[in-house]
Image (cartoon, rainbow, N blue to C red):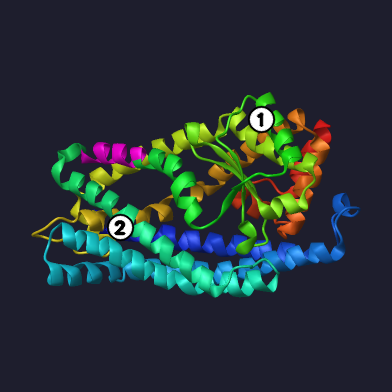
Amino acid sequence: MNPSTDLTFAFAAFLLAGLAVKFWLATRQVRYVASHRGTVPAAFAATVSLPAHQRAADYTVAKSRVGLLETAWGTAVLLGWTLLGGLDALNHALVSGLGTGMAQQLALLAAFAVISGLLELPFSLYQTFVVEERFGFNKITFQLWLGDLVKTSLLGAAIGLPIAALILWLMGAAGSWWWLWAWGVWIGFNLLLLVVYPTFIAPMFNKFQPLEDETLKARVTALMQRCGFAAKGLFVMDGSKRSAHANAYFTGFGAAKRVVFYDTLLSKLSPGEVDAVLAHELGHFKHKHIVKRIVAMFAFSLAGFALLGWLASRTWFYTGLGVRPNLDGPNDAVALLLFMLAIPVFTYFISPVMAQFSRKHEFEADAYAAAQTSGRDLGTALLKLYEDNASTLTPDPVYVKFYYSHPPASERLARLGAAA
């Protein structure tokens, strides 16, 4: 048996199988939503108008069709990077120009990120300025979009390149257990980001004003005290300058935790509904969902680094994925990129398991919110958010099981009604 050939066939088989399943699921979703477009489900007939239901169906179908094209394009690009030799050509071109060493490896990571970003750019533009614009969600100007792109790119380089350089150095200098040290660096970086992001990074893109509505502030503060939760502050974010979508979230870690409301959310919900939405988010903390997800992410990343530590020293790992390893220099950056490209292909089929856990957490948070506030207020708030965000009320059940991190409206509201 040839490990290199075996890896090539396995990669191609998983890639094609994943592509087939993605297309099957997406076409199921489009057909199912379109076939139920003409009638509002009986459970929502009294609260959702037919035009709103049809708008949500059309929005879902439009996004799904763009997603089909993006999936096909992404698969072609992935093949181009790997088995068709794109990453190999880029790597050896940079070796010819820069020689082997840290500069060449960082240049490879940077060049890969820039080229990948450019290849994905048309879909981002189309989604924002055509699909979102068509359904009235887009509020961002091209100048602001371009400014966001520049700031994101500069931040990515300023933060990502030093971390990448440290991991690459560990790969070359820390011996066979380098992956454990690299995992420690990765953990530390992510924990630091939880503290730094809300205070320094997020304000680069949006304005965060303290919540000024004293009545709402008193209600929210009382709810948080009743639930045993403390936050550094209550803020309103100017989400409306980019999108009409509404949301609320917690961010930060430890003493840096803060509650953030989109201005679009506060304009659409009543005070009781805001309480219920906030209580849902508090439910995630009460049930330790955030901690569980962080621990799970760290566990998976440890397994990933350990696997990479083993694969990086195997020649067949490179040749099996279309790359000729450097014979007179390090291959650490190539190993990182190949691993990031290949792992999603092999792990795609565990998506339903992760989605199931996420939906379970959402049900638990809903139940907590209904116990702390009003299940009726939560139900009406959710219905407003589903309608305002044009979330379809009739998704394909199989598509839901595979992808949905949040239960569909019918399941959530039925569960809340049964509890009441």
Nearer mark to the viewer, of 2 and 1: 1
State the extent of the magenta-drawn residues as a range. Answer: 178-188
Residue 181 among magenta residues: yes
| Label ID, residue 337 | 2
Residue 315 can be seen in this image: yes
User: Residue 23 falls in which quadrant of the image?
Assistant: bottom right
Image location (x, y in percent) of residue 50: 86, 64
Q: Could you tell me which residue is drawn at 80 percent across and 36 percent down?
A: 375
Q: Is residue 104 left or right of residue 270?
A: left
Residue 374 located left or right of residue 330: right
Question: Picture coordinates of residue 208 (x, y %)?
Answer: 57, 50
Label 2 neighbour load within 10 Å: few <14, some 14-19, many 20+? some
**Residue at left offset 63%, top offset 24%:** 228
Q: Quadrant of residue 141?
A: bottom right
Q: Secondary structure at mark 2?
A: helix
Q: Main secondary structure of the magenta part?
A: helix
